[in-house]
Each structure stands twice: as C-alpha cells, then as structure tokens.
Image: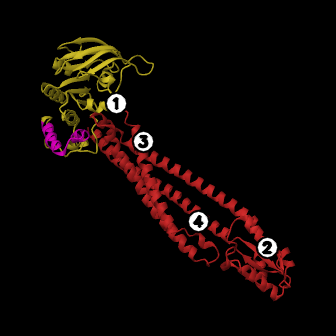
Amino acid sequence: MIQRLSYAFRETIASFRRNMTLSVAAVITSAVSLLLVGTTFLIQRAFDNLLTQWRGDVGMIVFVRPDVTPEALGFIKQNLESQPNVIDVKKLEYLDKTQSFAEAQRVFAGDPTTLSLLSIETIPSQFKVVPKTTDPELVRSLANQYRTLPGVAGVSLAEDEFDVISTLSGFVRTVTIGMSLVLLAVAVILIWNTIRTAIFARRREIEVMKLVGATDWFIRVPFILEGLIQGLAGALVSCAGLWGLNSAWTSGVAGFKSGTGVSALVVPGSYVNGVMIALLVIGAVAGGVGSGVASSKFLDV
Amino acid sequence: MIRLENVSKMYGSELPAVRDASFDVPKGEFVFLVGPSGSGKSTLLRLMNRQERPERGNVWVAGRNINEMANSQIPHLRRTMGNVFQDYKLLPNKTVFENVAFALEVIGKPKHVIGQQVPQVLDLVGLSGKEDRFPHQLSGGEQQRVSIARAFVNRPLILLADEPTGNLDPATGEGIMGLLDAINRTGTTIVMATHDHRVVNAMRRRVIQLDRGVIVRDQERGVYE
C-alpha cells in the first residue's frame, strides 16, 4: 500500500512538473520563433529603405573638361539649375578638380593602375545630377541634351547601377520574405507540437471528462485558451526582444555620420509597432488553433 | 433499460471479442457479467456507453438505439450513466471533493447544486470528513468509493462497473458491493463485469456468463461456477 501511495505521489509531482516545463517550453519556443520572424521583417524593411535611398541618389554625372573656361562652367551650371522640374536642384553638387581627385582616390582605392593615370591637372571636374524622374527614357534624353553643351566632356548614366539595385532589391525581398514564411511555419509547428505533448500528458483527465458526459467543446475550450495564452505570452516576450533589438540597432546606427546612407537602415517606429501587433496576432492564433487541432486527436474516446 | 440484439464486435481480424450477444436488462436490475479475462465482459460494457460500436447488431439504452445516435448526442447519453473502473480513474491532482464535483462541473451544473449534491453523495459512500484529501492519501477501497460517488452524483439511470473489486482485498470489496447494492435499491440499473466469484456468489443476482465472446449462460439469482 505504501508503495502504491508513494507511486501515486511521485506521479502527481511528475505530472505537475511535466506540465509546467512544457508550458515554459511552449512559451520560449514561440517567443524565439516569433522573434526570428519579426527580426526578418525588420531586416527586410531596413534593406528596402536603404535600396530606396540608393535608388534616389542614383543619377548621372556630367563630366566637365579640365581646361574649361569659367564662362562655360557657369553656363553649364546655369543650364542645370534652370530645370528645377526635371532635376533635383537641392541635390545638385559640383566637385572641383581637388574634390574629384579626392573622390577618385577613394573610389579607385582598390585599383592602383587607374589611379596612377589620374592627376589633379588631368582629372575632369564633375556635376552630380539627380533627376527627379526614375524613368530611364527621360533620363537618357536629358543626358543627350547635356552632352551637347560646350565644355562637357561626357555624361555618365547610372543605368547599370539601376539594374544592379533593382535586382538586388528583388533578391533581398524574396529571400527575406521566404525566410519569414519558413520561420513562421516552424513557429506554428513547434507551438502545435508542444501543446500536443502537453495535452497528451493530460489524456487521463480528458478520458474522465468524456465518460461523465462533457461535450467536446467543453473539453476543447480550456486547451484552446491555454494554447492561446501560451502563444500570446511567447509573442509578448518576442515583442520585448524585438523592441530591445530595434532600440539597440537604432542607437547604433545613430553613431554613423549622416549622409552615409546607413541612417536609412533605421526602421520607423510605426512599422515596428505594426510588426509587433502582427506577432501578437500570429502567436495567439497559432497557439489557439494549434491546441484546438491537437486536442481533437484525444477527444476520440 | 438496456437491450442488445445480436451484437458482434471485432477488433481487427482476430476472433470476435463479442459474438451474437442478445439480452435484455430491465430497469432496476443488477446484472453480473462473468467469465475469464478476455471473454468480452469489458467490451460489452464499452458497447453500452458507445466507447465502441458493434460491427453487427443493435444496442438500445433507455429506448434509443445508441448506434444510430449522432456524435453530438453521446455526451447526453453518458450523463444518464455512471462508470466505475478497476483502477478508479481518479484525477491525482484533485481532492476528493473536486474529483466528485468535476463530474457535475463538466456537464455545466451550477455551483449551488454542486455544493449541495457532492456532500450528500460523499456521505452516502461514507467519505464525509475526507473531502480535502487527495487520492494518494486514501486507501484503495476509499478511492473506489470516490469513484462510485463520482459515478452516482448525477443520479444516473444506469451504472456500469468494470471489475470494481479487482484491486481490493475481500473485506474492502464486500464494502464496495454493499454500496453498489444500496445504489441499486434506489432504482439504478447496475451492470457489473467481474471474475470475483465471491461477490457473485454472495449477492445471488442475475449472472450472464461469457466464454470467448459468446454468452454461454444467463441465469436469474445465479452463482459464478
């Protein structure tokens, strides 16, 4: 008898501990998975921001002959500034020979051969022009127009860069959305599986409920609520984590000089809030539906 | 109250667990299902509360063919029956009171009804004063009394008992039989599966004997043999 009592006692304690561990496991699992999902969303958005900014900065460069007269230079500048509807005058930038040479040294740092051919005397100065339109056809006709101006050595178009950026943008978006979906599926499966195990530990209770005439929904609802709360708790933890990560990221990015483009990597707070709400909904739904499906399996008594 | 018509039940491709069983249990009767292990006693009980469905034949409970009942009706069928098992099936993390109250809670009985009926039935089974114990703090006989209280608290028409004395010593088993007898006298129909010849011989009630799924004897005021 003592043996049987002690066995019953041990089983009781074990069942308690088992359930608690599983609940904690379910919460941690959903928190980690949802945090990964949320982080992917933010990374995707940050990349999107960055690419948008790059695309905005891409324009054309009007190279001016090194031996240009001041009059011709003035004429080119005037010509560019006279078209505020077509080009972004605020972003119009003139690099004189010294600045151009300094930029060349930076750009061609990995290409000493090209660099050795350049000198302050021979390098063309340049206007960096940002068209307001992103339509390649319009940009091209604009370039042809500038090419005819006296003193202009040539116009370089950023068409190639356009292509690279669009491709990169599409690629990054596909990869991050794909990752989000996979992680989301993993999160749902893990929550479902954890809850299924928790329900399996309580199958005896379910059997008794069935035999005294409880309806399936009466049995199922507490499990669904439990799963929903676990999913929601996990989502809350992941939101806290996401918020912490984003704050650290934002303050880290703030350390960079402005104009380097890195500031585009900061995700706006409204978007972060949206992602958090989405995570809460996903956590609650995945937990609730997962445990509803899992409990149905054990209702067949 | 319960009627079986040519009922056969198979598990897989093995020998049938029950073959062509027919009998009638009138209201208020006490019936023993006897026979060795594996003779089909438990299967017959499981057919009566539709934990199983027969391959052939019909099972009637309180005038309704339960094989044709919709699944949504089964909980209501089971509320008219109590179940008692050899291993009690008590919930270890609930007290005596909570275990019995559980049967009323899950069918949605209000709190004041529970507060009234549970002490009544615990008094009936002789467990007054032990409401706050947990199952592991009780003896086997006491645990079986809790299980009977849980089965009876809803005043069911029928009580199905599967080897209720199987884990108990003879004296304790006698006490449990006295309790089932008292419940039977309130008008509750009782069907009890057992291979405990002492209780069968002591009670002298109807005996239905099974052998490898077939009914070989159906006798009023019978003994075990």
How would you rate the neighbour count of disc 4 (Cα within 10 Å): few for under 14, some for 14-19, many for 20 or more? some
Which element is circle 2 on? helix
Q: Which residue is drawn at 55% across and 52% down?
A: A181
B31, above or below A301, in the image: above
Q: Distance between the residues labelled 4 and 2?
A: 36 Å
Identify residue type, mark 1.
Asn
Point out the frontmost of discs 1 and 3: 1
Mark 2 sits on what residue?
A145
Q: Distance between the residues labelled 3 and 4?
A: 37 Å
**Chain identifier matching the red colour in the rendered picture:** A
Point out the frontmost of discs 4 and 2: 2
Lower position in the chain sequence, tag 4 or tag 2: 4
A158, above or below B61, in the image: below
Q: State the hue of chain B.
A: yellow
Mark 1 sits on what residue?
B71
The answer to which quarter of the image holds residue B198 is: top left
Lower position in the chain sequence, tag 2 or tag 3: 2
Q: Is residue B188 left or right of residue A129?
A: left
Q: How far apart are marks 4 and 1 (CA)?
A: 53 Å
Specify the label residue A46 is tagged with: 4
Is residue B112 located in the magenta-colored stretch of the structure? yes
A248, above or below B18, in the image: below
Which element is circle 3 on? helix
Identify residue type, mark 4.
Ala
- Asked whether disc 1 touches disc 2, contact meaning CB atoms under 8 Å apart, the reply is no
Q: Which residue is drawn at 58% across and 77% down?
A: A255
Which element is circle 4 on? helix
Mark 3 sits on what residue?
A294
Q: How far apart are marks 1 and 3 (CA)?
A: 19 Å
